[in-house]
Image: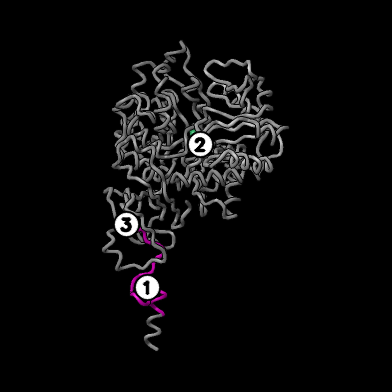
Amino acid sequence: MRKLIFMAGMAILGFGCRTGKEAADLMVINATIYTADSSFSTAGCMVVKDGKILDIGDYDALKDRYEAAHVVDAGGKAVFPGFYDPHCHFYHYGAGLATRADLSGASSFEAVLQRMEEFAARRPEGWLAGRGWDQNLWPVKEFPDNTELNKRFSDRPVILIRIDGHAVLVNDKALQAAGLNEKSKIPGGEVQLHNGKPTGILVDKAADVLKDLFLKEMTEGEAGEEELVHGIIQGQKNCFAVGLTTLADAGLKYSEVQLLQKLEKAGTLKMQVYPMLDWSEENLEAFVTKGVYRSDRLHIRSVKFYADGALGSRGALLLEPYADKSGYTGILTLSPDTFAMHCADALRYGYQVNTHAIGDSAIRLVLNTYAGVLKGKNDHRWRIEHAQVVHPADITVFRDFSIIPSVNTTHCTSDMGWAADRLGTDRVKSAYAYKDLLQTNGWLCNGSDFPVEQINPLLGFYAAVTRTDLQGNPPGGWQPENALSRREALLAMTLWAAKACFEENEKGSLAIGKAADFVILDQDIMTVPVEKIPLTRVTETWIRGERVF
Ligand SMILES: [Zn+2]
């Protein structure tokens, strides 16, 4: 009897009766685990219980102490903390997906058509769009023509965008809507013909004509809630497939947060989201004035402002005129006085302020406004989003007022072809200066800004490290003195990203007591030749001990 009581006690304490080992839910073995902790250590084994890391270390030491219900043999592969995107537009990405069928991975043209038929049933009117087909995955690896599209969707325009976005297949209805025919000549583009008739395949600038027309038509009608939900869930799935486990959603309306809350309640939102709120009456009333909001998947304690536009469209606010538009310095998109008032209010409610600022003038204004409110070093973690063109005289203000440079390394490699045209050869040296910002401030965070860029965070890692495009150009990297090391680039999308969202004590690295958010990659991004980094595939994604991909 006494023995029985003893054994029952052991079971309650979580020890396996027969083995004397402590019971766990999951053990990851045979892995190179990059913990991303302060010493940047690696481990061979990780033990998970109740969604958290119970232990981590050498397999030989842990195998005798724990008995796990489930064992994941990583096959010697590299394991990293779940990727954390500190600046993206998840909701709007999902909303975009809601208006287009996902054709990625379709293994034949017939499979593409089937997906379009399913999508058409959900979206019975107007333009019909899909994205992501790739004829290289099909039995016949050739561009299709639009015969079947015309047959199956005769009464509405259809556009199917290829995975790279450089080619589209459209039906005759869409060609008519765009006013294109066999005689159309579009510089920089091709209207493909067969026997003198358009096949429906349009390439480059000709594809753009149709894409632009579709976008124009789309903005006129908003997606319904059912579609939105479908798009967000699809977006979540896509994010899991590239290893993302937490996303900071940079700018949400109250109604958008409400929909995320609804999905969370329904149990369909598995992604962990850190929404930055638009400054609105509704958001103030529902969240800001009530303090930090925390639920299972949502963490709300920040607001988002916009100080200027973007550099490409010459909206970024510069101190000196654009090099390619004389006398013109860009656009200020806020009122400095109102902004300062809102910042003071945000501080009073304990809210983080994150402001989009790209040009050196906008950045100076935001830095000075923040400094006036924050007064000195602090732990409020206010951020400047993008921080693209920082005047060299202003860089220490980040450090002195504990302001976080929240950068996007893929913007650098997307913009490097024309950034010097806008800024001139001198000023461009202080643009996309991530290493300078990192060294002065001690840390920074790196987000993708998807869907402006692709969702895959490893592209941001690659851009940070190489400062080249995916073809490796320019050789040696663009302004390579501002490249980050792999270690810095990894921290910027894990631990430091979590820190930029007040979550570094629970996420961002793999340590005892932290969330079991992790990814397994098919190759080790810390050691493979740089040109192989973009080819890396995520084989598994786990959130709080649950496999989501
Ligand atoms: Zn953004």
Amino acid beneath label 1: Phe
Q: Position of residue 68 (x, y in %)?
A: 38, 66
Q: Secondary structure at mark 2?
A: strand
Checking the image for residue 410, the label placed there is none
Q: Secondary structure at mark 3?
A: loop
Residue nearest the viewer, comparing 409 with 205 = 205
Q: Position of residue 363 (x, y in %)?
A: 42, 27
Closer to the N terminus: mark 1 or mark 2?
A: 1
Quarter of the figure that contains the N terminus: bottom left
Q: Quadrant of residue 130?
A: top right
Q: Is residue 180 left or right of residue 483?
A: right
Mark 3 CB within 8 Å of ligand 1: no
Instruction: Check the image and name the residue furthest to the front.
Output: 195
Q: Which residues are magenta?
A: 8-29
Mark 1 CB within 8 Å of ligand 1: no
Residue nearest the viewer, comparing 395 with 72 = 72
Q: Quadrant of residue 17?
A: bottom left
Checking the image for residue 30, the label placed there is 3
Q: Which residue is mark 2?
A: 304
Closer to the N terminus: mark 3 or mark 1?
A: 1
Residue nearest the viewer, comparing 7 with 345 = 7
Q: Which residue is mark 1?
A: 15
Specify whether residue 11 is painted magenta: yes
